[in-house]
Image: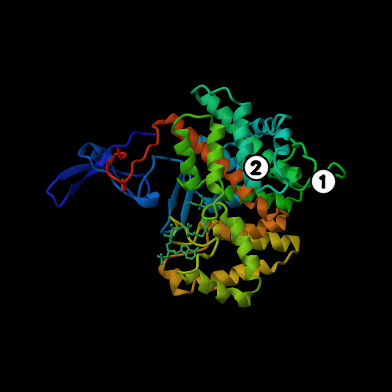
Amino acid sequence: MPKLHPTLTAELQLSDGRKFSLPVYQSNLGYDAIGVESLQKEKLFTYDQGLTSTALCESSITYIDGDQGILLHRGYPIDELALRKSYLDVAYLLLNGELPNTEELDAFKKEISSHYMVNEQFTRLFQGFRRDSHPMAVMCAASSALAAFYHDILEDSQKSRDKTAIRLLAKMPTLAAMCYKYSIGRPFMYPQNNLSYAGNFLYMMFATPCEPYVVNPVLERAMDRIFTLHADHEQNASTSSVRSVASSGPNPFACIAAGIASLWGPAHGGANEACIKMLEEIGTVDRIPEFIARAKDKNDPFRLMGFGHRVYKNYDPRAKVMRETCHEVLKELGVTTPLLEVAMELERIALSDPYFIERKLYPNVDFYSGIILQAIGIPTSMFTVIFALARTVGWIANWKEMCEESLKIVRPRQIYTGYTERHIDK
Ligand code: SDX
């Protein structure tokens, strides 16, 4: 990535007369950024709670235009990728910068499928958990445990990083399916290298040793599309957590565990599980006004799950594709669910309500995903695990980009508001 060169300067003047010239760095797309590194020597910090206006890094992987509701992966719009390419096409694009040709995709698929299996000792890791453990707790542990199996501190090379990327991409579906099987007391199913990435995941989730399992192509396509829609999303909370942890140079599998932990929260990836629970609690269309009122009541902590976004102040383009996929899958399966009717009416009412319009609150990626996951047969407790599985490639792509660029340790400062120096009484 070409080094940043300032194109403008920003003149900062304090009311005490101090003046500073600061560089302004130009982005290829979106906002330019003021470089504030030099303020430290002037004994000044900047302060930006929640980093709402702070660029953590340079990146060329994904771009979001929140005002226009645009999401590009290496320049390609998300709807084109989700509707015309496979998840492994998109994973290759995120990791390598270009879409694969047929030969490259075949080689990529073959390499990934040869790493689907996990060490047989992994089965014992699960024995330490209660059957009713939340699968995200198990996934956090399982990802860290991979670090124990690949404990050799990786040499700092492209080849080593590429191998780690393959291992993680290949094993996350296996670990996710093992979490599910363990939670229902069913035997783990070995990966099937002859199946597609999504097909193999569905096989490991739903096949049993007692009878043949045939992957439903409708579900396979829907699963693959859901993976694509969750693959990467700039410096969201979990991706920036991975970057922050990776900046000190630990084992990359441990960095991914940090991403899984951050994604778990209901404000982030956990919103898909929280959203379906909200839709089930609403139950019927006539109860929607009660919940809209609660979402607007400042004395009520309730928020509409699957609504609002730190960056999108327009419709999340992934939610549009997810809603279309919802209709397509339910129709092809001949399935109806009151939850879709509730979701659509909730969206219609919220988008015409001044409270949501003024705050530019729209459905996000988590609003419709749970309805499709339920139609596929995925239990609610596994929804965020699916998000983590799909987002792993985004975390890896950012980890690789960071390692290849500048592994500068992430070490923010603070505004100290505590005691000045004091001493223990004699
Ligand atoms: C993901 O960053 C990413 O890219 C994340 C993600 C990804 O792919 O990685 O896109 C995935 O995490 C999507 C978001 C999933 N989370 C939810 O759906 C949870 C519900 N949404 C909110 O909690 C909230 O919208 C956030 C956390 C997503 C964003 O919150 P912000 O940017 O910190 O905004 P805010 O909390 O300052 O809210 C601004 C105003 C407030 O009202 P006022 O104080 O101005 O009166 O909007 C209100 C909030 O109360 N508001 C909501 C709301 N979201 C914001 N009110 C009701 N319901 C909501 N969902």
Q: Bin the neighbour count of mark 2 within 10 Å (Cα to Cα): few under 14, some 14-19, many 20 and up.
A: many
Which residue occupies 70% across, 38% down? 128
Percent of width and height locating residue 22: 22, 42
Percent of width and height locating residue 267: 51, 55
- Nearer to the camera, 239 or 196: 239
Query: What is the quadrant of residue 405 in the picture?
Result: top left
Percent of width and height locating residue 133: 68, 47
Q: Which residue is mark 1?
A: 213
Report the number of discs: 2
Give the secondary structure at mark 2.
helix
2 or 1: tag closer to the N-terminus: 2
Query: What is the quadrant of residue 360 in the picture?
Result: bottom left
Q: Find the distance from the CA under tag 2 to the CA under tag 1.
A: 26 Å
Report whether 109 appears left or right of 358.
Answer: right
Q: Nearer the viewer, mark 2 or mark 1?
A: 2
Q: Which residue type carries mark 2?
A: Val
Colour scheme = rainbow
The answer to whether residue 365 is above or below residue 104 is below
The yes-or-no answer for disc 2 within 8 Å of ligand 1 is no
Q: Bin the neighbour count of mark 1 within 10 Å (Cα to Cα): few under 14, some 14-19, many 20 and up.
A: few
Q: Which residue is mark 2?
A: 138
The answer to whether residue 282 is above or below residue 229 is below
Give the secondary structure at mark 1.
loop
